[in-house]
Amino acid sequence: MGLPRETRTTWHDLELRVRAEDPEVLGYVSSQHQLAREEPERAATRIDIEAVSSPSRLAGLTARPATERRESYAGWWYGCHRNEDGAFVLVSQEGHEFSHALITTDFLTWEIVAAHEHELGLVVTRTMRELVREHFVDRGALMLHGAAAVLPDGTGVVLAGPSGAGKTSASVQLARAGGHCVATDRCLLLADGPGWTVVGLPLSTRLTREAAAGLGIGPGEKDGLIRHGEAAVRRPDPKGKISLSNGEMRRLAGVEFLASTRIDTLVLLENTGAPRPLSGPVAEGEVVAALAEHILVPDTAYRGRWLSADATPEPAGDIKGRLGELAAAVPARHGTWTPATYKSDVLTAWLAPRAGAGKTGDPS
């Protein structure tokens, strides 16, 4: 057996280190979390993960009776117990494709045990996503069903709107124009010092077949996509979308990611099928009402901080009051457009902040 290998990433102020024997597992984890640049000097908290595959070890953990149950996602359950050494153990139950266990003594150092090597990468990345979510929720972040990007000039943009508004398309096109993606579907809004920061939740980018083709990703690339662990996933995407890691988005579409950025402007997107894009300023009250529709606190997909010592439900708090603080600190604009029509150069100019600008049309 060779020496353990390691990969690490800094997600805003959270450093995550993963050790595993199999380089394919580390390759999968690295591709999912690949960033254009790391900022390790920001890291204030570190989480260490040891990832192993051991059917016999997992069988022993599974044989212990559960003394508690925790719901990680809607309908995804873990049975929990304490080991002889006092470690807290979560064993996957209904809802999960893969049998696995999560073991911790302090909720900062974790061991992830899966039954099979080819399933381990996906189990690790899902767990890392939840550790990121819980870290920032614990810091008071609001989770938004929205996207975020950095324009080529460095402007940080949060994109909100209903399903189909083009949030993913906008964030991807802005990255292709020379900026960066921060999030394509879920992001965390964090009051961070004197300003506000948006942190992306590490998720695969989900694209329709048409959107993928528009980025130049065709059927011929499917054999080159990472598949570590995904072959055993039986549930097809309900909307027929394909999921691409950060590394795949970079390799196939030239799209690079950052973990976070300051929020310089808020954009409320609407897909109207308009012949040209229009944008204009939005009053603070309208911003609060619009964002509140897409804030996921408490997130209905979760029932608590399930990877924390205290698994009580996330407190909703004064959501509109906090959104009011965000709206007062960051200018907002309303944008109507047709996502399938407008590409990166037009989109970048359309979304770029313009001091004192009123309602504007297609900048081209």
Image (tube, rainbow, N blue to C red):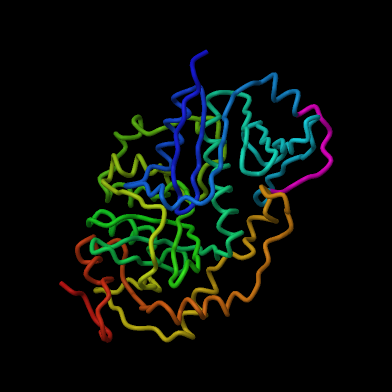
> Where is residue 48 shown, x and y percent of the image?
56, 38
230 or 140: which is nearer to us?
140
Q: Is residue 339 above or below residue 247?
A: below
182 or 122: which is nearer to us?
182
Q: Is 209 displayed left or right of 152 in the figure?
A: right
> Where is residue 134 shown, x and y percent of the image?
60, 53
Taking the magenta stretch, the answer to whether it contains residue 330 is no
Image quarter for residue 233?
top right
Image quarter for residue 342?
bottom left
Q: Quadrant of the C terminus?
A: bottom left
226 or 53: which is nearer to us?
53
Q: What residue is shown at x 33% (from left), y 47% (from top)?
A: 37
> Where is residue 360 shown, x and y percent of the image?
24, 81
The residue lying furthest to the left in this view is 364
Region in magenta: 62-71
Q: What residue is shown at x 76% (from left), y 29% (from top)?
A: 62
> Where is residue 266 shown, x and y percent of the image?
39, 73
Q: Is residue 83 above or below residue 304?
A: above
Q: What residue is shown at x 27% (from left), y 86% (from top)?
A: 358
Q: What residue is shown at x 44% (from left), y 24% (from top)?
A: 23
Q: Is residue 72 above or below residue 352?
A: above
Q: How many marks?
A: 0
60 or 220: which is nearer to us?
60
